[in-house]
Amino acid sequence: MDLIWVLIVGGLIGWLSGNLIGRDVPGGVIGNIVAGFIGSWLGTELLGARGPVVGGFHIIPAIVGAIIALLIFFCSGAWRCIPKTLKNRLKAMNHLIGLSP
């Protein structure tokens, strides 16, 4: 039962982190669980063991770590880290002021 609880909390941390940065985590449920585990490890290393503990995860460092891990993952390509809606707005603005052909 503890394993199921850990998987659920890890998945929720990954899902929440993906929603906070406005991107879907690739891989669905498994991707959310992996992002939650990596984020928990990274956040605890960076911030220490602080905040409330749920399912063996320190929630605040885990969410912060998952956000950092997802940003690193999504920004591994230069232009891919910017959401499509923001890209379209930037292109429209550049077109209006005459910076694009």
Image (cartoon, grey):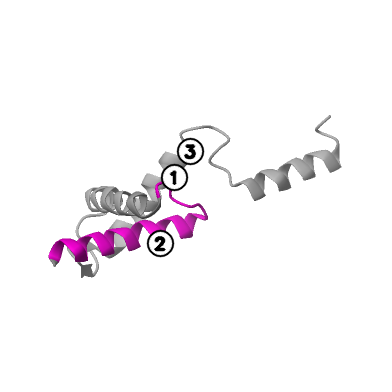
Few, some or many residues within 10 Å of mark 3 (<14, 14–19, 20+): few
- Of residue 74 and residue 29, the one placed in the foreground of this image is 29
- The residue depicted at 84 percent of the width and 29 percent of the height is 101
Residue to which mark 1 is pinned: 71
Callout 1 amino acid = Leu
Q: Disc 3 on helix, strand or loop?
A: loop
Query: Are there few (<14), some (14-19), or many (20+) residues within 10 Å of tag 2?
Result: some
Q: Main secondary structure of the magenta part?
A: helix
Q: Amino acid at mark 2?
A: Leu
Q: How many marks?
A: 3
Q: In the rendered image, which residue does mark 3 sit on? A: 75
Quick check: 46 left or right of 96? left
In this rendering, the label closer to the viewer, 2 or 1: 2
Q: Residue 81, how many percent across, how many down?
A: 53, 41
Going 27% across and 64% down the picture, which residue do you hit?
9
**Which residue position is annotated with label 2?**
16
Q: In screen coordinates, is 101 left or right of 66?
A: right
Q: Which residues are magenta?
A: 2-27
User: Is residue 3 shown above or below 73?
Assistant: below
Cα distance between the residues tagged 2 and 1: 13 Å
Q: Residues within 10 Å of mark 1 (few under 14, many from 20)?
A: some
Q: Nearer the viewer, mark 3 or mark 2?
A: 2
